[in-house]
Amino acid sequence: MPQPTAIVDIKTLGPDPDHHPMWQIVVIHRADPYDPATDSIHWWQIRPSEQSLHNADSHTVEHSGYHAQMRVPRETSTVSFLAPAGPTRIEPADLDKEILALLDGAELIGATPNFDARFLRARLNAAPWNPRTLDITTLAAGFLLGKAHAYTGREPFWGTPPDYYASTRYLVEGRLPHRLSQGTGVRPPRPEPNRSALGNALWARRLHDRITLPPTLYAATHPSPVFADR
């Protein structure tokens, strides 16, 4: 049976998983890694306590768009925005059970998935996913360098490369989302802080599928975004 995958993106109140909780979590679970039709998308927001906000890293809060994007009412703890019945309040313990079930045995995929895994492990007190994660920015950089090698028939090098390698080098240096998108022909995500975790995860899925799926299947399954990048 194929190993499931889970494209994950989170937003936090700071860089330390022991002191800065997550306030936004997205999981795009794919039961069959070769079939986008098996995807299910899950998007939660968790309203942090006043103490957690007091201890938050101010730069992270601003950069993540917390004040503009937080949509959970003050009297509520957690909301599942893509529940079948629409936005639904859920208990934190039920959220943890749902995430554990979705990530059980899955390969985590995302931009810096090791960062996401640290925060998920701290919240869940468990790590049921495959310890091997896939960073889509590294995947995209390798894809573009491989194309450059196939096009020129020469090994990549970083001294004074030919023009094709020079342009490829520009695209992969820093692994910046808009450059990687430009190189792979994928619509880039919105710039922070206007981009939600859902927008990040949908971009990661487009980039991953652009590289790993046959072109005809990618075109059939990605004619337009499932959701606007928000």
Image: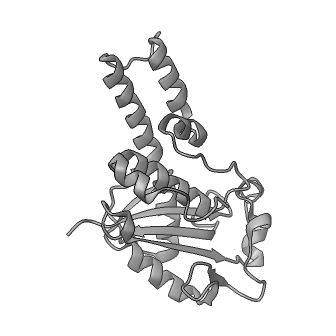
Across and down, in percent, residue 207 comes to 47, 48
| Residue 172 locus on image (x, y percent) | 50, 31
Residue 28 located left or right of residue 132:
right
Q: Nearer the viewer, residue 196 or 74?
A: 196
Q: Position of residue 152 (x, y in %)?
A: 34, 17
- Residue shown at the point (77%, 56%) measured from the top left: 62
Drawn side of residue 97 relative to residue 34, left or right = right
Residue 54 sits in quarter: bottom right
Location of residue 83 with respect to 226 vertically, above or below: below
Q: Residue at x 35, y 30 (%)?
A: 146
Q: Quadrant of the C terminus?
A: bottom right
Q: Nearer the viewer, residue 131 or 172?
A: 172
Residue 199 horizontal side relative to residue 215, left or right = right
Which quarter of the figure has residue 12? bottom right
Taking the spot 36% from the left edge, 71% from the top edge, the residue there is 38
How many numbered markers are drawn? 0
Image point 40% across, 52% down: which residue? Answer: 218
